[in-house]
Amino acid sequence: MTSLPYRIVEHPADTGFEVWGDSVARLFEAAAMAFFDIMWRLGPSRKGPPRIIEVTAGDREELLVNFLEEFHYLYDAEGLVCTGVEILTITERKVTARAWLRDFNDAMDLELLSVKAVTYHQLFIGKKNSTWEGRVFLDI
């Protein structure tokens, strides 16, 4: 059994997570995994077709917020949940990812937490030795 690349962080008014990876790309993938696991418990199903997601921002922290907000938008606007994500390219201001999306299924899936927004509260991305670490809080 391998450990998850994140841990949930409780906060009086919100919830959040800390993530880590051996690269910025792995950090973003771990953040997406934590975000999805906080929001949904998905029933067994095949991955939906992949979609290319491109997000830009002014800096790396804003990029992480915008990246997670893109999945929040896809769920709210289109009823799509993500079953997997792979970072294809990432720079300080742009991330391109392959995301496997499918319709949320009321019979199989459960929304665990209604997220209002990804916040900048205590947002952090940094490198400690050879590990990239990050922290994100969600407005619930």
Image: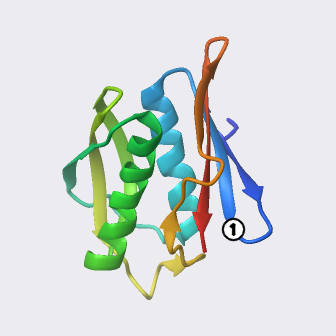
User: In front: 87, or 102?
Assistant: 87
User: In front: 21, or 107?
Assistant: 21
In this rendering, position of residue 14 left or right of residue 87: right
Residue that label 1 marks? 14
In the current view of this chain or complex, which residue is farthest to the front?
A: 58
Q: Is residue 64 above or below residue 59?
A: below
Residue 74 point in image, percent of width and height: 30, 68
Q: Quadrant of residue 8?
A: bottom right
Which amino acid, mark 1?
Asp
Residue appearing at x 59%, y 63% in the figure: 138
In this rendering, position of residue 44 left or right of residue 75: right
Residue 94 point in image, percent of width and height: 27, 35
Q: Is residue 29 above or below residue 107?
A: above
Q: Is residue 46 above or below residue 34?
A: below
Residue appearing at x 37%, y 46% in the figure: 85
Helix, strand or loop for disc 1: loop
Residue 103 point in image, percent of width and height: 30, 75
User: In front: 78, or 1?
Assistant: 78
Residue appearing at x 57%, y 60% in the figure: 37
User: In front: 88, or 54?
Assistant: 54
Residue appearing at x 51%, y 34% in the figure: 27
In the current view of this chain or complex, which residue is farthest to the bottom?
A: 107
